[in-house]
Amino acid sequence: MAPLPDPRWRHAVVTGGAGFVGSHLCAALLAQGTDVTCLDDFSTGLPDNTADLHDHPGFTLRRVDVSRPFTVDRPPDLVLHLASPASPADYLRLPLHTLDAGSLGTRNALELARRSGARFVLASTSEVYGDPHEHPQSEAYWGNVNPVGPRSVYDEAKRFGEALTTAHSAAHGTDTCIVRLFNTYGPGMRGHDGRAVPTFVRQALDGEPLTVTGDGRQSRSLCYVDDTVAGILAAAAHGMRGPVNIGNPDEITMLDLARRIIELTGSASQIRFIARPVDDPAVRCPDITLARGKLQWEPRTDMADGLRRTIAWFRARNNSPDRRSAPSPSGT
Ligand SMILES: NC(=O)c1ccc[n+]([C@@H]2O[C@H](COP(=O)([O-])OP(=O)(O)OC[C@H]3O[C@@H](n4cnc5c(N)ncnc54)[C@H](O)[C@@H]3O)[C@@H](O)[C@H]2O)c1
């Protein structure tokens, strides 16, 4: 589904715009005529992720750590706040950085929106539901999060970010929206970022065993990145406050996902079972009734199609720098 052009947006600031989802979002905004300032500290993203946009006259890329106070040259009318490590491998490596991005970074991005009179969208996550006792998860469910577990740096940072966004709107009248993104996949992911799709695709293409955690019966729901981007822009355009779930309600077990990727790549790889991470959720599936009803949004991309496009991108990038691990900022 192509996002609807919104003539109100002349200039958007995208924090974390050099990351996986952010780079697709920057491209979609530019394609609909919105100028974009991308702010990124490149802690988990790369300037290379937006290489196709660098020559666009409406695109500006700046190295900024949004956890520190910052200004932009031109006031935006839309602020999309995505800056945060997102894969477990990244946020476990960068725990304090992740807490800062969700708290201080969200505060600074909210202040930019307030000063500019801009609409603000927080990219929150299904991780706010933790290891859920309700299935599928609707926005009314408050979640089951371990506040001192290893994943808490991400989960609690996002929960705090939601509280801050809600309080900012109440205290200052900031025009805010919270979108809860569920697992998203597609071209542009890092092969070593630790998330299931890029890990399995890399392993299958390299002829390595696909490492499935636990018995592989834990489920996830995977949304193709174009659909996630369309959902974020639909929520931004609607004017709703959220939270609203953006994800694909089709569930798949990790074992089935691994088998599917072996089949689609034509790989001879086997499956190897490894230990399951601490506090890894058993199930994860969005109830998207709210997004369907209010935004007329739902995912359109069939999983086989999305996986084929992702595999093709990984094949084309086989020897390129996206196969590296992200550099680690010091002090975290
Ligand atoms: N991809 C998913 O499946 C998914 C699911 C739920 C929520 N989200 C949310 O969407 C957003 C983007 O996720 P992603 O998958 O693209 O991750 P990503 O790691 O690819 O991108 C995050 C970007 O934020 C940047 N960043 C991190 N801290 C920063 C800081 N302090 N200042 C400036 N930039 C900073 C990174 O360098 C990177 O470019 C995150 O907020 C994440 O929590 C993603």
Image (cartoon, rainbow, N blue to C red):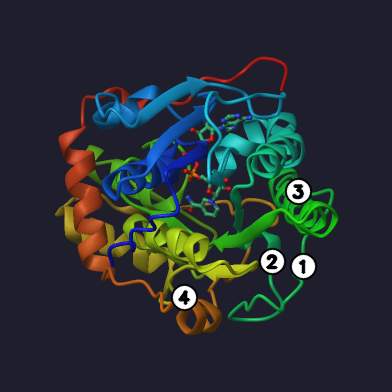
Which numbered disc flags the more N-terminal residue, 1 or 2?
2
The residue carrying mark 2 is 129
The residue carrying mark 1 is 144
Q: Residue at x 57, y 26 (%)?
A: 72
Q: Secondary structure at mark 2?
A: helix
The residue carrying mark 3 is 152
Which numbered disc flags the more N-terminal residue, 1 or 3?
1
Q: Residue at x 70, y 48 (%)?
A: 151
* Contact check, label 1 and label 3, Cβ < 8 Å: no
Q: Residue at x 33, y 46 (%)?
A: 209
- Residue 110 drawn at (x, y percent): 70, 43
The residue carrying mark 4 is 295
Find residue 199 and report its image quarter. top left
Q: Amino acid at mark 2?
A: Tyr
Q: Amino acid at mark 1?
A: Asn
Q: Is mark 3 within 8 Å of ligand 1?
A: no
